[in-house]
Image (cartoon, coloured by chain):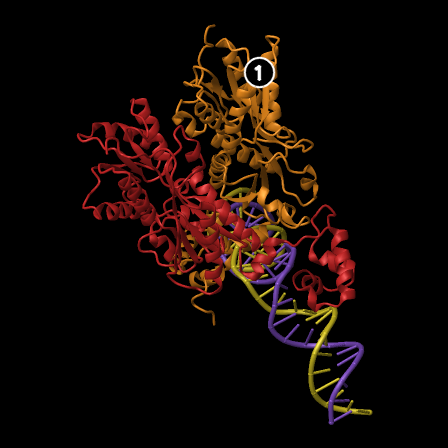
Chain colours: A red, B orange, C purple, D yellow
DNA sequence: GCACTATATGTAACCGATTACATCTACTAT
DNA sequence: ATAGTAGATGTAATCGGTTACATATAGTGC
């Protein structure tokens, strides 16, 4: 006798409906091949018992997990969470769920285990990697599920990628500053090993080179408010003080604004500032921030879609570059005395 | 013959090591009960084959999923993502993974399916609910896994909860303003049906009642920058303009500051402002924001720990109230002319 | 030397679905 | 009337582990 508290199994439904388990399974997964009469009886039995499939059993049999794992460097960072929202959206439409792993924290675990133990077909049907600092060797195990890189990317790791057009965005930002007459432009970057930083630096160099210029100053930050704040001191210390700054993200730009204002400099009168990302706060900063818009949720969605397509028909090395656009607000102004 | 591309199974390891599958399983899960000699042989075979357990098969047999599902109202909201980070941390230590479901988006799906289909023991070993607006009936199915409510809570849903001390935080904030001499205090709230809003409103009322006062104005916001910005207009429209505002979260407070400054009012000279949450941006706002600190990652961690404890030994209706503290920065000042 | 116990390992049932294959029925074509 | 076929359903193998139970071996006490 079976404990009535237990969740009903397909067998219970079958018995109640007077059919075999196979028929019940068919009603649930492919109703069109079973006779109307039978189907109705089974549906009634399902309703009466309150049966729902045991997802684990189905997954085992079908050799799939029903979920995609996202590797994020820092889950608490709002930048990533809106990408995740886009990913979750696209996955749910396909009946897949979203698993999340914070790589910075997981890393600290046992050296052999840690992240690696999650990179198996038995744990996820696919991987979306948002952390460009991971070792490409992690993904070379034969049991590693299909991978799509999004936002950041890993040098030496092939496979599809979805990226924002970082170089173009940086170029737009700097061209905007140049157009306002600025020539002494500082670049507050992300960590130098970060792939985003690198491609944004390339965009900056490109825009400046068109006029035969180079950044008068560069400071390496960490994409944080605090590092932007610290950049204010660096700016003041420059012998030829920059009149404009491009920051690799909005958080650093906002931190920088706060730091400059605390030192008595005014934005945009004394210094023009451009950020990157267009986080929600950018529009509500003390001085609304001119920045480069990047559609993060959309990027996440495209990454998930690409993963699903890639699973169906592997397309190596497809690279999707999403457009970005400059949003001009009030943190930039023509060079004084120009 | 087995396709050598396939992931090795426990059977392959057993054959290579010259032992039974049971022994291999024991080496992996409970090494102490197998002889040293045998253990070494098995470990060698595991290394040679590159075997890793099939998580789905193990989970099916052990009747567990290996993951906990967090229900969040809005994944893109940084407020929730740092709670998730805390949850993920605590779960990983127990070998569990974090599944995420964005309830606002999932809601829009089929009425019968949607969220409900995720609330099954076969999909998650436990639930952490961060959305107080959900229907308690969702969790009454017999197959629903153990639930812990965190941060927000659902009226009519019993079970353990982890909350910040919202009433005390609001009281601290208002007492601080009263102590600075302010008497005309406005309260910018979250949505009135939100449980957080309700308990914060209670704290506000309590603090004011001690002096026989009531809020001179109240405006219902949506926890967003935009609604805080809109509150600036409401404040200006008051016949007796408030000299201080308590906002139910930092985002609204920052939006409000921006709105007031755009209208020529100065913070804190003309209006003092207190927020709630202590998001990172609070310290870097144009005027650093006085606010109530709530340790979000810690709250998430405690929620996960409570869930794990609850699974082991169900403790109904345990309620954990985490302390909060006032962080005084520069957005509050003594009443002018007091 | 014998019974008994502890330790180590193997055998096979089991978790709960899906699905290849077998079977049965009813109908069509010759 | 008979074979052939399509459609509906049942039977049982299968996914890949874990673990209760059985068995074998070595060690202990009297």
**Within-10-Å neighbours for mark 1: few <14, some 14–19, many 20+:** few
Nearer the observer, B151 or B121: B151
Instruction: Report the residue at 34% width, 51% height from top.
Output: A154
Nearer the observer, B100 or A58: B100
Query: In the displayed image of the protein, which residue is found farthest to the front?
Result: A338
B237 sits left or right of B263 in the view: right
C4 sits left or right of A288 in the view: right
D28 sits left or right of B218 in the view: left
Please give the chain letter of the residue carrying mark 1: B
Could you tell me residue C10's position as x and y percent? 52, 61
Q: Name the quadrant of the C terminus of chain A.
A: top left
Could you tell me residue A271's position as x and y percent? 28, 31
Report which residue position mark 1 lands on. B239
In this view, B11 is above or below A218: below
A231 sits left or right of B121 in the view: left
- Is residue B303 visible to the viewer in this orientation of the structure? yes
Nearer the observer, B86 or B6: B86
Number of marks in the image?
A: 1
- Is residue A1 visible to the viewer in this orientation of the structure? no
In this view, A166 is above or below B168: below
In this view, B41 is above or below B5: above
Q: Is mark 1 on a helix, strand or loop?
A: loop
Instruction: Report the residue at 60% width, 38% height from top.
Output: B311
Could you tell me residue B232's position as x and y percent? 51, 24
Could you tell me residue A115's position as x and y percent? 41, 47
Nearer the observer, B161 or B132: B132
């Amino acid at each position: 006798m079976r404990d009535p508290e237990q969740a009903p199994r397909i067998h219970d439904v079958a018995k109640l409906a007077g059919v075999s388990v196979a028929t019940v399974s068919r009603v649930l997964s492919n109703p069109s091949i079973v006779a109307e009469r039978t189907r109705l009886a089974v549906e009634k039995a399902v309703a009466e018992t309150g049966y729902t499939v045991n997802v684990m059993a189905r997954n085992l049999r079908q050799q799939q997990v029903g979920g995609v794992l996202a590797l994020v460097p820092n889950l608490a960072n709002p930048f990533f969470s809106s990408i995740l929202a886009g990913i979750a959206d696209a996955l749910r439409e396909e009946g897949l769920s979203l698993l999340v792993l914070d790589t910075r924290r997981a890393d600290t675990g046992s050296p052999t285990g840690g992240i690696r133990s999650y990179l198996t077909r038995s744990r996820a049907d696919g991987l979306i990697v948002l952390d460009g600092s991971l070792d490409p060797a992690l993904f070379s195990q034969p049991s590693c599920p299909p991978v799509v890189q999004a936002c950041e990317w890993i040098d030496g790791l092939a496979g599809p990628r979805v990226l924002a057009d970082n170089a173009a965005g940086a170029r737009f930002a700097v061209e905007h500053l140049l157009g306002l007459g600025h020539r002494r432009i500082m670049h507050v970057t992300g960590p130098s090993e970060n792939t985003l930083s690198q491609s944004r630096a390339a965009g900056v160099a490109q825009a400046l080179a068109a006029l035969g210029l180079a950044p008068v100053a560069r400071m390496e930050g960490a994409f944080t408010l605090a590092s932007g704040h610290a950049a204010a001191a660096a700016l003041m210390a420059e012998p030829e003080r920059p009149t404009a700054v491009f920051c690799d993200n909005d958080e650093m730009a906002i931190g920088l604004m706060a730091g400059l204002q605390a030192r008595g400099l005014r934005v945009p009168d004394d210094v023009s500032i451009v950020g990157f990302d267009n986080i929600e706060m950018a529009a509500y900063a003390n001085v609304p921030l001119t920045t480069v818009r990047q559609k993060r949720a959309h990027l996440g969605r495209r990454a998930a879609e690409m993963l699903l397509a890639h699973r169906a028909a592997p397309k190596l090395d497809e690279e999707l570059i999403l457009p970005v656009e400059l949003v001009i607000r009030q943190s930039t102004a023509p060079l004084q005395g120009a």
